[in-house]
Image (tube, rainbow, N blue to C red):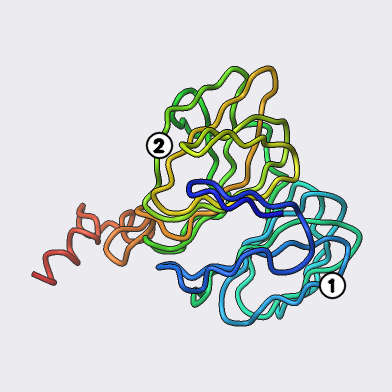
Amino acid sequence: MKNNTESFIPFELTHGLLSDMADDTFPTQLWGCTYDRLNLPDNGTHFGYVYEGTVTVEHAAGTFNVHKGMYFSAPGKTVMHGEGSGIAITRIGYNGFFNIGGPVEAQGRLKYIDGCTDSLLIPPVMMGDSCLNLLYFPTGINQTLHTHPSMRVGMVIRGKGECITPEGIIDLVPGRVFIIPAEGHHGFRTAESEMSVIAYHPDSDFGPTHEFHPMINRTIVDGVSANAIEAIRTK
């Protein structure tokens, strides 16, 4: 079911296309996969998470059994099927890397606001690219209301809590899928339960650039990093 609030749009996990945001600044589609065959389009990169059971991912790179708690990214034509359920988020027009990872850890490794933590599961290939995260909310969190400059797509994978918005309070339970539109005011709250969320960002202000990445930074010529040498040559 879809609840058309301005700041937070929840969905039940059902099979097929849950939301088509092809007209967004960062064109995106949200898919549910529930114990059936799901053919994903060939015009983008798919960020997936397996919520229950095992999902078989068929791709030009091969056929892979992806188990509960694992995640993947797959550019181009991709098929999901098998004895499991999960989500896929397609960033239309983006050519990412093929990756499989997980299972996700109990908590994030990076500090986030108000005592929460975050792990960057699938990082941007280059600055500005899409990414996939694990957000962790300890018990007793009352997160500061905030916004994001671009949409967020998420799924509650463990625990429970609430999302506080100007329009009301939305209960969050395992398996709940949601979209937060760009600039939507919201904050997450937990009481006696922890909560973990998979979160997709369609863009990033972080990541490697041609001028700054580990290979060029740590290439030393006569005691000087090659990134500095390249910068001098381009002036």
Looking at the picture, tell me which residue is in the foreground, 195 or 119.
Answer: 195
Residue bearing the label numbered 1: 37
In the rendered image, which quarter contains the C terminus?
A: bottom left
- Give the crowd class for mark 1: few <14, some 14-19, many >=20 residues within 10 Å: some
Q: Secondary structure at mark 2?
A: loop
Residue at 82 percent across and 56 percent down: it is 85
Q: Is residue 28 above or below residue 194?
A: below
Q: Are marks 1 and 2 in contact (CB under 8 Å)?
A: no
Residue at 48 percent across and 70 percent down: it is 27
Looking at the picture, tell me which residue is in the foreground, 179 or 230.
Answer: 179
Q: Is residue 34 left or right of residue 144?
A: right
Q: Is residue 108 left or right of residue 193?
A: left
Mark 2 or mark 1, which is nearer the start of the sequence?
Answer: 1
Alpha-carbon span between mark 1 and mark 2: 37 Å
- Give the crowd class for mark 2: few <14, some 14-19, many >=20 residues within 10 Å: few
Residue 194: x %, y % from top left? 67, 25
Looking at the picture, tell me which residue is in the foreground, 78 or 36.
Answer: 36
Q: Amino acid at mark 2?
A: His
Q: Is residue 139 visible?
A: yes
Q: Amino acid at mark 1?
A: Arg
Q: Secondary structure at mark 1?
A: loop
Farthest left residue? 235
Residue bearing the label numbered 2: 146
In the rendered image, which quarter contains the N terminus?
A: bottom right
Residue 66 picture quarter: bottom right
Q: Is residue 193 above or below residue 126?
A: above
Q: Is residue 201 above or below residue 136?
A: below
Looking at the picture, tell me which residue is in the foreground, 169 or 97.
Answer: 169
